[in-house]
Amino acid sequence: MLKGKTALVTGSTSGIGLGIAQALARQGANIVLNGFGDVDAARSQVLAAGEAAAARVAYHGADMCRVADIEDLMKYSVSQFGRVDILVNNAGIQHVANVEDFPVERWDAVIAVNLTSAFHTCRVALPAMQNANWGRIINVASVHGLVGSAQKSAYVAAKHGIVGLTKVIALENATTGVTCNAICPGWVLTPLVQKQVDAKAAEHGLSDEDAKKLLLREKEPSMQFSTPEELGELVLFFCSPAANNVRGAAWNMDGGWAAQ
Ligand code: NAD
């Protein structure tokens, strides 16, 4: 379905971004990976997923807090594959603390990675998408783009912000072949969430399994984590012809969290 297209997925060395990159590669898109940590393992997994479709894989280590890095990432993507057709803004970090205790430097970092980076990637990617009259921008927001939770001020502010940014970009491009949508996952068991499971286990003296159940019970009626694979499939839907007129949506996959 995506042969000949290029997808840039930020924060794709782990978790949800890695799942999305694999799904896109399986459909034949060339992939630009980004993120920290075990780059070689991520690259091998995405290459394996895209092998049958002959997808190519490149990597750039831009720090999504830095505007110059982001501009360089976009230039690199174009130099590798000609153009970015699909942009998935996924890189994200979390910090948990009450507002009065929230470290100022953590607030700035969460807003920079989870929100401002998407403004910059879109700003740089949009002109070529508009010229081609085809583009897909998919912002990985969160159920926290729709509802709040205590102790997550920066994250909730950034995620509500990216849902707003999604609507504006969708409207500015509404008569073109460029769409912009957000996806809003509930709990997905990635390293970002495992840290919160570990904190719950330590706070309440629980096993890993019981801490996971507690986390789910507090928020997610289905009592079930979503998976990076399921989110990858949702991204494929947004890239498919059936989603040509889906614009500015904030689509939750949250086990009923936001329905309460
Ligand atoms: P993760 O920690 O597994 O992955 C985060 C990725 O972002 C990694 O590849 C990491 O290297 C990269 N990253 C972090 N800081 C970066 C920076 N400054 N520059 C470049 N890359 C950076 O987390 P995840 O759970 O897969 O989260 C991915 C996205 O999904 C985030 O935007 C997160 O807010 C969102 N999300 C996650 C959940 C969940 O339950 N896990 C729920 C809703 C939304």
Image (tube, rainbow, N blue to C red):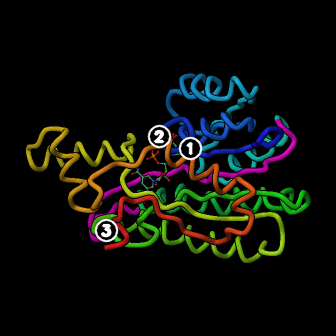
The x, y position of residue 229, in whole percent, is 50, 41
Q: Earlier in the sequence, mark 2 or mark 3?
A: 2
- Horizontally, residue 79 falls left or right of residue 19, namely right
The x, y position of residue 214, in whole percent, is 18, 53
Residue 65 visible in image: no
Q: Which residue is mark 3?
A: 149
Nearer to me, 36 or 225: 225
Q: Quadrant of the N terminus?
A: top right
Q: Which mark is residue 11?
A: 1
Residue at 72%, 77% in the rendered image:
171
Q: Which residue is mark 2?
A: 15
Q: Quadrant of residue 179?
A: bottom right
Q: Residues within 10 Å of mark 1 (few under 14, many from 20)?
A: many
Residue at 72%, 69% in the rendered image:
245
Disc 1 residue lies near ligand 1 with CB under 8 A: yes
Disc 2 residue lies near ligand 1 with CB under 8 A: yes
Nearer to me, 241 or 228: 241
**Is residue 3 highlighted in magenta?**
no
- Image: 172 above or below 144: below
Circles 2 and 3 in contact, beta carbons < 8 Å: no
Circles 2 and 1 in contact, beta carbons < 8 Å: yes
Q: Residues within 10 Å of mark 3 (few under 14, many from 20)?
A: few
Nearer to me, 190 or 219: 219
At label 1, which amino acid type do we have? Gly
- Horizontally, residue 30 falls left or right of residue 17, namely right
Q: Which mark is residue 175?
A: none
The x, y position of residue 127, in whole percent, is 85, 61
Circles 1 and 3 in contact, beta carbons < 8 Å: no
Q: Quadrant of residue 62?
A: top right
Residue at 65%, 25% in the rendered image:
47
Q: Earlier in the sequence, mark 1 or mark 3?
A: 1
